[in-house]
Amino acid sequence: MTDLNFTQLMAFFPQVNLSDAESSHFRSLWETKTFKQYEYITEAGGIENYFYFVLEGVQAIYLLNEKGQKVVLGFSYAGSPSGVFDSFISRNPSVTFLEALKPSTLLAISFNRYQELFERYPVFHEWGHEFFKNILLGRLFRESELLTLNSKERYIAFMKRCPDELKIIPQKYLASYLNMKPETFSRLRASVRY
């Protein structure tokens, strides 16, 4: 891991202050993994073994509906966490897929090493509490948007808050995430300024 990558990773843990020796140990727990475009990072039926931090690329997490169509639940991109968190924590098989939509470089920490963080450094408990609280609040916010906003409102809200990385991914993934048909998404993209 380069010094720049380590600086990016530590910015994701703002509550955590480590001594030089602790930083060296923390750094040693992570490995770099690369994935090609459209390569699976995690497949449904498997157990997620890693918690990821994205250095570059865009990933989508989705499940398949009864027709075999992708239902996109979310995205990860540079500077954000990635992985199938429910499977990672519960150690149960995933019902979702995690796929690299663009060539991706991720920092990965295994489940056992992740557990070691919490045992060795109590300060990670504060970070973990905040992280999973924000995941829950984000999920509730997304569900309320899906239930209360029309297609145009969902499109505008998403495009206003999404980073540039998400604006260039295949529109079928964005349409699925926003719970609309690709044609509707295409029409909104062509006609709506946000």
Image: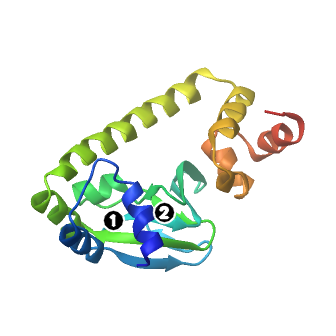
Along the line of sight, the residue nearer the viewer: 67 or 108: 108
Q: What residue is disc 1 on?
A: 48
Along the line of sight, the residue nearer the viewer: 135 or 127: 127
Q: What residue is disc 2 on?
A: 98
List x then y, in percent, for residue 11.
41, 55
- Residue extending farthest to the front is 20
Name the residue located 64 percent from the left edge and 23 percent from the top edge. 149
List x then y, in percent, for residue 142.
51, 33
Position of 8 compared to 189: left or right? Answer: left
List x then y, in percent, for residue 54.
48, 64
Quadrant for the C terminus in the image: top right
Position of 70 compared to 80: left or right? Answer: right
Give the residue type at disc 1.
Glu
Name the residue located 40 percent from the left edge and 60 percent from the top edge. 83
Q: Are marks 2 and 1 in contact (CB under 8 Å)?
A: yes
Tell me, yes or no, if residue 135 can be seen here.
yes
Tell me, yes or no, if residue 65 can be seen here.
no
- Of the two numbered discs 2 and 1 on the same chain, state the one appearing first in sequence: 1
Quadrant for the N terminus in the image: bottom left
- Residue extending farthest to the left is 119
Name the residue located 47 percent from the left edge and 55 percent from the top edge. 80
Residue 58's image quarter? bottom right
